[in-house]
Amino acid sequence: MNNNNQFGNRPIIRKVKGRVLVGGSAQAGICATRNMLSFWGGYDPATGEIVDRHHPLSGENLTDRIFALPKGKGSSTGSAVLLDALHSHHAPAGIILNKVDEIIVLGVVVFEEFFDRKIPVVQLDDPDFEAIFSASVASISDDGTVTLYE
């Protein structure tokens, strides 16, 4: 596809329909991993940095980026960490999952309930999730459509 968009001259490489876990829209650069991440102990909500030194994305900052991961890992307190990141404006712009993760979704839903703001959370099947790794920018629409750009 050769569609131009708000990201300059980046062509669309794939447009897919995901399962909406939390509605919303976002447009941002992608930070993607095939490895699970625990928000509790693996992510600093005050800075947006992945602080798990054993994770391949250690040192990456997720602030205002679309974060794609298979699912979260670990503690249910990860919801509170994500809630803190949303409140401090150091959260991802959106989250794309390969598997449903109730802990991640809960943090976003609680933020929406208390602060009337949210970020989209969408689940993609295996082939569509794998396509993320060939993209550098993505948009998520309210209906769960994920558009991947070079």
Image (spheres, helix red, strand yellow):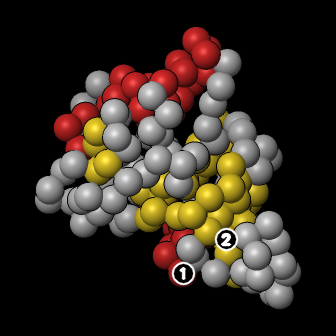
Relative to 99, is 76 on the left or the right? left
Tell me where residue 145 sits by quadrant. Answer: bottom right
- Residue appearing at x 36%, y 66% in the figure: 34
Mark number, residue 112: none
* Callout 2 crowding tier (Cα within 10 Å): few <14, some 14–19, many ≥20: many
Q: Nearer the viewer, residue 26 or 88?
A: 88
- Residue appearing at x 61%, y 16% in the figure: 115
Q: Which residue is mark 2?
A: 148
- Residue appearing at x 67%, y 18% in the figure: 116
Viewport quadrant of the C terminus: bottom right
Q: Whole-percent x and y of residue 148? A: 67, 71
Q: Name above or below for residue 25 compared with residue 5.
A: above
Q: Whole-percent x and y of residue 19? A: 66, 48
Tell me where residue 128 sits by quadrant. Answer: bottom right
Residue lying furthest left: 54
Q: Which residue is mark 1?
A: 134
Asked if the residues shown at circle 2 and circle 1 are in contact, with their CB atoms under 8 angstroms apart, the answer is yes
Q: Whole-percent x and y of residue 80? A: 36, 23
Q: Is residue 79 visible?
A: no
Q: Nearer the viewer, residue 57 or 98?
A: 57
Relative to 53, is 21 on the left or the right? right
Q: Whole-percent x and y of residue 22? A: 64, 35
CA gap between label 2 and label 1 equals 9 Å
- Residue appearing at x 70%, y 37% in the figure: 23
Relative to 38, is 69 on the left or the right? right
Amino acid type, label 2: Leu
Secondary structure of the residue carrying tag 1 is helix
Secondary structure of the residue carrying tag 2 is strand
